[in-house]
Amino acid sequence: MTDMPLTVKRSIELLGLVLLVTILVVGNSIIMPVIMAFFISIVVLPVYRFLIRKKLPEAVAIILPILLLVILIGLLVWFFSAQVGILVSDFPQIKNNVNIHLKALSNWVSNISHISTREQLKFITEKSDDLIGMAGKAASGAAVTLSSVFVFVGLLPIYIYLMLFYKDILLRFTFMWFKPEHHPKVKEAIYETESIIKSYLVGLLIQVSYMTVLLGGILFLVGIKHALLIGVIFAILNLIPYVGALIGNIIGVLLTLTSSTELWPVVTVLLVIAVVQFLDNNILMPRIVGSKVKINAFFAILGVIIGGSIAGVSGMFLSLPVIAVLKVIFDRTVTFKQWGVLLGDERPEKSPMTFATFRKKKTAAVKAGTEK
């Protein structure tokens, strides 16, 4: 490929990119559980190695961390279900609060415009019918979506077990793709990929824990109803880079509005979320995850959008670690090094338009960019 004309090489790269995206779109229901299982198997790998050192049988050393993971997810689902149950039990009060808010909004609209209460009621009725119709369509596809989730979750433990059991075969397969003189670089890339995935995913697990405790605890202390539910929803949505925090803010405001007839709880929720997010983004998360995932903000956001369009929430969640792994691979290949530069946040210290040294693929002086 090194002897080909530049236009041919770039055309092959772009065609490969299109082919990769096409494969992900067509086979996302098969590929996404495999990718998720691959990342989780790397996270539980230290536990597996520890149990092997303790002379446990290999099958037991694989099953125990998987059981631990299942228990952890089960506890999270139980906690979330309990909080939703509390919300459902308050439904009559929520209905009254919503009516009060709608009446106040109607009075405000009447004061600033010539739209009568009857016209507003007609508009709300029409939109309510539209929403009911949309909800019916969504409910008709809920069974298919739910079955897909169960299949996804059911396949994960099987894939994780098999990946850990056959990891040496997978490693040998990887090395056999490259010439022996390139094996040291391949080994380095494997170790760095493992380190990045472990630090990122374990960091996210820790993040969910302290975000739930911090946000839910502070809101509970200041007297906000459904504080723990707001905390756990925001903590889980915050796992989706950039987009999740915005959705979490909206849901937090809506839950607060339905549980209170006053506006001060809404302001309190927004302020507490802002403070907790500031601590998370600037103090806590950088110290937990470190600076290993150096993806620039543009491609992080673009990756989240593309991942969401390909595979929904799981694609949004996996987008950043997938891009980070690709960057590790690109940085260690001469042919694709420019793609690693494009994904990273290491900006050249001087303009490549003026200084020719910053146009080459060799290591160049860089300055810090923007990272999450």
Image (cartoon, rainbow, N blue to C red):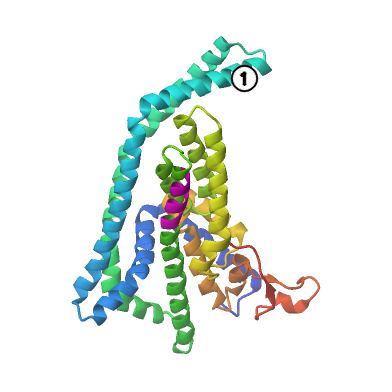
Q: Which type of secondary structure does the marked residue at label 1 adopt?
A: helix
Task: Tell how many labels.
Answer: 1
Q: Position of residue 168 (x, y in %)?
A: 31, 79
Q: Quadrant of residue 160?
A: bottom left
Q: Position of residue 191 (x, y in %)?
A: 44, 78
Residue at 60% over, 76% down: 4
Report the front residue among 106 and 123: 106
The answer to if 122 sits in the magenta stretch is no
360 left or right of 245?
Answer: right
* Main SS class of the magenta portion in the image: helix
Residue highlighted by disc 1? 108
Residue at 52% over, 24% down: 101
Magenta span of residues: 209-219
Q: Quadrant of the C terminus?
A: bottom right
Q: Residue extending furthest right?
A: 354
Residue at 48% over, 39% down: 251
325 left or right of 27?
Answer: right
Report the front residue among 88 and 295: 88
The answer to if 213 sits in the magenta stretch is yes
Q: Is residue 213 above or below residue 183?
A: above
Residue at 33% over, 72% down: 45
Q: Is residue 140 above or below residue 354?
A: above
Residue type marked 1: Trp
Report the front residue among 163 and 105: 105
Q: Residue extending furthest bottom?
A: 181
360 left or right of 215?
Answer: right
Report the front residue among 314 and 169: 314
Residue 130 visible in the picture: no
